Image (tube, rainbow, N blue to C red):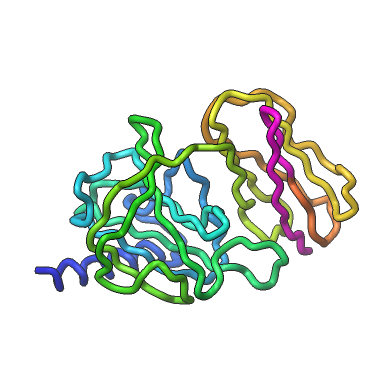
Amino acid sequence: MRSNLFSLALIISTGLFAQTAELSPYQKKTMNTERFARPVNTGVNHTLLILGSAWEVSPEFGDEIAVYDSKDNMVASVAWVPEQEGHAGLAIWGDDETTSEKEGMTKGEAFRIVLFDKSEDKMSDVKVNRWERGDNIFIKDGVSVVGAVEVTSVVAQDMELFQNVPNPVIDNTSISFYLPEDANVRLTVSNTLGQEIMTLSDSSFLKGMHTIEMDATNLSTGVYFYKLEANKASLTKQLTLVK
């Protein structure tokens, strides 16, 4: 029975991360996250499969699972759906070595799993009690399969700025952020000299995740920094523009 379940999980993984032009209805549902942004597809990933039988109490439709690296950068996300026996497959993206910023994980780096409970608006750490295969250490083309988990401590949901997608940027990119409460948001872009060259937003937003589009067609090739300011706090990340 366990071998059949493991084989099914691997089939789901193959279908979930296949680079096809058309996504299946199942794939579209799993990508429809509202709390976490979509991570940067760097072309290098480690597959994480959480078996549907791994949960003591199964997630509910609308809940989301995310993976963070050792620096608390989100590197994988998926919306949990009851199809496929409740198995959840995530592509944990590795770092793109062609850019100076860290968009993903590096070889040998440990990752952690969190669960967002939509009905309670609560995020919790997920402790793995049994690995069927692999572990929580990132390797290129690696596969880790989780056989038993435990939802443990609640994690504070602070303001969060996600890596822009896509990155590197050719002409346009999307910048997402999460607000733990309503706030006036100022999102700006600066060059390497510290000169502010673009204001993407200076307006009020409700609590939750939001995405703003950036048109970079008039910018020159190079590294830029985007800064999020809200409720007397600020976060900064960098992007790479190529022509």
Q: Is residue 85 left or right of residue 102?
A: left
Viewer-proximal residue among 27 and 53 = 53
Is residue 238 inside the magenta stretch?
Answer: yes
Q: Is residue 88 left or right of residue 32?
A: left
Viewer-proximal residue among 123 and 219 = 123
Task: Provide the major secondary structure of the magenta segment.
Answer: strand
Query: Where does residue 242 sit, x and y in percent of width and height?
Result: 76, 63
Does 226 appear above or below 203?
below
The residue shown at (57%, 63%) is 104
Is residue 55 inside the magenta stretch?
Answer: no
- Residue 64 is at least partly visible in this image: no
Q: On the rendered image, what quadrant is the C terminus found in?
A: bottom right
Query: Where does residue 230 sit, x and y in percent of width and height?
Result: 68, 31
The residue shown at (38%, 48%) is 125
Looking at the rendering, the stretch of residues picked out in magenta corresponds to 227-243
Does 107 appear above or below 51?
below
Q: How many marks?
A: 0
Identity of the residue furthest to the front in this view:
153
- Residue 138 is at least partly visible in this image: yes
Q: On the rendered image, what quadrant is the N terminus found in?
A: bottom left
The residue shown at (70%, 51%) is 237
Q: Quarter-wise, where is residue 233 in the image?
A: top right
Q: Quarter-wise, where is residue 43 in the image?
A: bottom right
The residue shown at (41%, 65%) is 17
Query: Where does residue 65 sit, x and y in percent of width and height?
Result: 38, 49
